[in-house]
Image (spheres, rainbow, N blue to C red):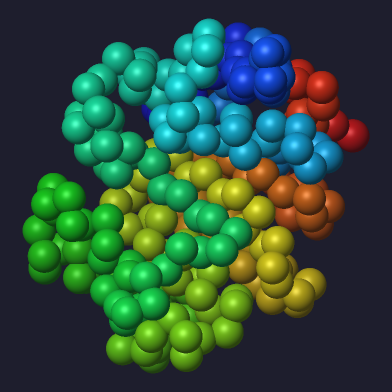
């Protein structure tokens, strides 16, 4: 069963002649099907923690393991392939490529060349149907609403059947009704494939929809009420 273990992760950044500590020995443990919201004030280090968990940034100390694998022991090329196969990212600004169609954007993770075209196309079609965009496959991102673009990003994140889904303010730019719909789609797909889901959010409704909630304050993770 999939397991994520983050242990004693610390991270600082240069601040003049000193170092600004953003994370202090942050630890958490999640298993397949779990969902977690990380909340806290702006600038508290939530996105930094998410980037370290997703192996987009390296900690100064501490470890991250997904199914017993330490991504930071890999070469840069192997790390990129590992991340593409195991982690799905959903960003606040969706990061869709404006010149590509909806279908082409969902298929972007296959460009690494580790999956067959027919299987990927079928998977993308299945996901776009699940997020209610099967009639929009040939449209460009500029022809979609904000909620539709975020649902395309969710489909793209789940294309490779990742074990871990990391979402950074996935509903931050959406109105309440659209945010609720996006949250429901994200949770439904996450549960169906028994992935681990971690959301960084300022939204109380999104945080309350997760199984667990932690607050990052002064560089440390605490149980959130």
Which corner quadrant holds the N terminus?
top left
- Residue 11: image x %, image y %? 60, 18
Relative side of 52 to 38, left or right: left
Residue under the image location 54 percent in, 69 percent down: 150
Relative side of 215 to 140, left or right: right
Give the quarter of the image for residue 83.
top left
Along the viewing direction, whichever of 40 and 190 lies nearer the viewer? 40
Residue under the image location 29 percent in, 44 percent down: 84
Give the quarter of the image for residue 133.
bottom left
- Residue 78: image x %, image y %? 20, 29
Which corner quadrant holds the C terminus?
top right
Along the viewing direction, whichever of 150 and 207 lies nearer the viewer? 150
Relative side of 25 to 128, left or right: right
Relative side of 117 to 102, left or right: left
Q: Would residue 27 be seen by someone viewing this image from the given angle?
A: no
Q: From this viewpoint, which residue is outermost toward the front?
A: 17
Along the viewing direction, whichever of 77 and 135 lies nearer the viewer? 77
Residue under the image location 48 percent in, 12 percent down: 63
- Residue 46: image x %, image y %? 68, 36
The total number of labels drawn is 0
Q: From this viewpoint, which residue is outermost toward the right?
A: 225
Q: Would residue 143 be seen by someone viewing this image from the given angle?
A: yes
């Amino acid at each position: 069963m999939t397991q994520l273990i983050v242990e004693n992760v610390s991270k600082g950044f240069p601040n003049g002649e000193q170092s600004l500590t953003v994370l202090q020995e942050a630890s958490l443990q999640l298993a397949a099907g779990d969902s977690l919201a990380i909340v806290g004030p702006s600038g508290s280090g939530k996105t930094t923690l998410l980037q370290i968990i997703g192996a987009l940034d390296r900690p100064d100390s501490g470890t991250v393991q997904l199914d017993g694998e330490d991504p930071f022991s890999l070469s840069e090329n192997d790390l990129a392939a590992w991340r593409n196969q195991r982690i799905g990212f959903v960003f606040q600004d969706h990061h869709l490529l404006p010149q590509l169609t909806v279908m082409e954007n969902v298929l972007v993770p296959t460009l690494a060349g580790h999956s067959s075209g027919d299987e990927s196309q079928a998977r993308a079609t299945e996901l776009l149907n699940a997020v209610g965009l099967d009639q929009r496959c040939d449209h460009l991102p500029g022809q979609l609403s904000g909620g539709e673009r975020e649902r395309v990003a969710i489909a793209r994140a789940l294309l490779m059947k990742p074990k871990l889904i990391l979402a950074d303010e996935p509903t931050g730019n959406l109105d309440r009704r659209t945010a609720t719909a996006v949250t429901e789609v994200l949770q439904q797909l996450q549960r169906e494939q028994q992935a681990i889901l971690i959301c960084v959010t300022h939204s109380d409704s999104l945080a309350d929809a997760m199984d667990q909630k932690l607050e990052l304050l002064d560089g440390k993770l605490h149980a959130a009420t």
